[in-house]
Image (tube, rainbow, N blue to C red):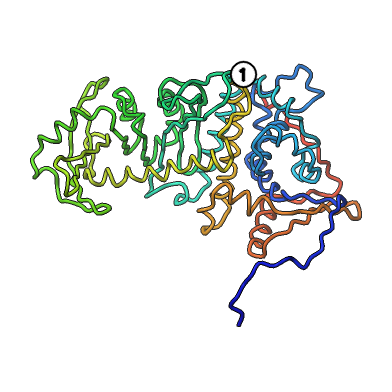
């Protein structure tokens, strides 16, 4: 039995050829099929102001340019230059129904020509798509313990160059844009990109706009300390969430004083966490900007060599039926929500906005958000249970980046996709269900007509 394994030279001789009709991104048929399933291309074409052309009979349709950006991001591309290079893959273009793609200059001009209203409608389309995907999903894949989790947070998008519109110096004295996001389940529900002065400047507007999603069911809202200002806590309490918790570590002086005055009997039974003994209690305080006292769950601990107690506080719903310990245990699940940022920022490489114009960057990030949600919907709606832990990069690498060869015979065109044996059955079922065969003689032209006026 062989026990020594070495790295050796390959036995193969290599032959390079430019002939043949092959693409390395055959899996993009899945992205196109899901978008058609939700009529996304048609709905993009109907957005008012998204097509700035005066003569619609020439140039690129808006859904064509949007599709170019989305297919670029979902195939591992990150820049407008990558989107231009998409045109070198003729088989991929024919596979997803693109006749031709624009160069990066044309894409940049289209992004800069967007209006605040068209960007808002694009974000609204993304939110509507997320709601439809959640409605079709298995509850266990989008809810935790029967509750729809909602999470708000802000992240800094660092930029380089003083001409980036809207950029400002952040807390590290780095030039950055603020990206404020509202998540629900595994989806990025809504977002705003800009040079905002506070880390939760858009929170109220985003929650108010999407409140119907959690109005009739159980929900849980998480937020970081940036959302702990008094007026934001008041707004959160009245936003319709079944339960909620917000980290509170900015203005803890009064809370620490109140907690220190509590007798030991008020702190409940001790609990061990990572080798440190913690106790929990309720504390009430009225922060500035509130009209009534707010309920806080308090946690205290100290190491054997320490003299004074350390405290942590979490604001939560009034008259909570939970214990303060249960509030902290649930709030610590917020860390899993924060990790989703790495999927959009690292896996789709959204660390660097592509344009100098703030409005163009907002349009690009709206399309990137839609691309992320398309991949997430593909996972949540169609992949098997053991694949629900896949990240965006895993979906791109193992599901979308698969070789495919175009074959033409007897006036029929086929795409031969090379798949791992373990995914063969899944692909057959997906294509049979969502990619119906085109009838012989049926044209490929696709026209989107205005919806009838029902007024």
* Left or right: 394 in relation to 285: right
Residue at left offset 36%, top offset 40%? 220
* Left or right: 280 in relation to 17: left
Residue at left offset 18%, top offset 38%? 282
* The N terminus sits in image quarter: bottom right
**Callout 1 crowding tier (Cα within 10 Å): few <14, some 14–19, many ≥20:** some
Image coords of residue 267 (percent x, y): 14, 44
Q: Quadrant of residue 236?
A: top left
Residue at left offset 37%, top offset 37%? 221
Q: Please name the residue that numbered disc 1 is placed on.
A: 115
Q: Is residue 41 above or below residue 109?
A: below
Q: 250 or 144, which lies in front?
A: 250
Q: Which residue is the extreme one toward the right? A: 410
Q: Quadrant of residue 47?
A: top right
Image coords of residue 405 (percent x, y): 80, 54
* The C terminus sits in image quarter: top right
Image coords of residue 296 (percent x, y): 23, 35
């Amino acid at each position: 039995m062989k026990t020594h394994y070495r790295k050796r030279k390959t036995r193969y001789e290599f032959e390079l050829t430019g002939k043949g009709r092959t693409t390395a991104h055959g899996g993009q048929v899945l992205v196109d099929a899901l978008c058609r399933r939700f009529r996304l291309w048609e709905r993009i074409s109907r957005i008012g102001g998204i097509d700035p052309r005066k003569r619609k009979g020439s140039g690129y349709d808006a859904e064509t340019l949007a599709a170019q950006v989305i297919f670029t991001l979902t195939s591992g591309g990150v820049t407008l230059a990558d989107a231009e290079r998409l045109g070198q893959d003729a088989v991929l273009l024919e596979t997803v129904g693109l006749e031709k793609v624009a160069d990066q200059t044309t894409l940049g001009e289209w992004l800069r020509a967007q209006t605040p209203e068209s960007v808002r409608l694009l974000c609204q389309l993304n939110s509507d798509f997320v709601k439809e995907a959640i409605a079709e999903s298995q509850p266990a894949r989008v809810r935790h313990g029967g509750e729809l989790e909602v999470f708000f947070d802000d992240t800094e998008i660092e930029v380089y160059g003083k001409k980036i519109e809207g950029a400002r110096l952040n807390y590290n004295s780095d030039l950055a844009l603020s990206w404020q996001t509202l998540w629900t389940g595994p989806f990025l529900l809504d977002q705003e990109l800009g040079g905002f002065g506070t880390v939760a400047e858009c929170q109220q507007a985003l929650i108010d706009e999407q409140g119907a999603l959690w109005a009739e069911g159980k929900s849980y809202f998480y937020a970081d300390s940036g959302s702990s200002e008094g007026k934001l806590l008041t707004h959160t309490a009245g936003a319709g969430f079944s339960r909620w918790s917000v980290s509170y570590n900015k203005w803890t002086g009064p809370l620490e004083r109140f907690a220190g005055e509590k007798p030991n009997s008020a702190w409940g039974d001790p609990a061990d966490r990572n080798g440190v003994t913690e106790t929990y209690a309720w504390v009430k305080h009225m922060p500035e900007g509130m009209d009534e006292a707010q309920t806080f769950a308090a946690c205290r601990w100290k190491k054997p060599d320490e003299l004074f107690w350390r405290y942590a506080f979490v604001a939560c719903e009034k008259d909570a039926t939970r214990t303060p310990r249960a509030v902290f245990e649930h709030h610590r699940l917020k860390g899993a929500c924060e990790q989703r940022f790495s999927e959009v920022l690292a896996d789709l490489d959204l660390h660097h906005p592509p344009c100098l114009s703030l409005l163009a960057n907002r349009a690009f990030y709206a399309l990137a958000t839609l691309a992320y949600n398309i991949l997430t919907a593909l996972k949540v709606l169609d992949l098997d249970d053991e694949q629900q832990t896949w990240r965006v990069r895993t979906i791109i690498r193992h599901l979308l980046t698969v070789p495919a060869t175009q074959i033409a015979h007897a006036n029929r065109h086929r795409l031969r996709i090379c798949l791992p044996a373990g995914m063969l059955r899944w692909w057959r079922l997906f294509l049979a269900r969502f990619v119906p065969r085109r009838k012989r003689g049926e044209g490929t032209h696709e026209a989107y007509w205005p919806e009838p006026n029902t007024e």
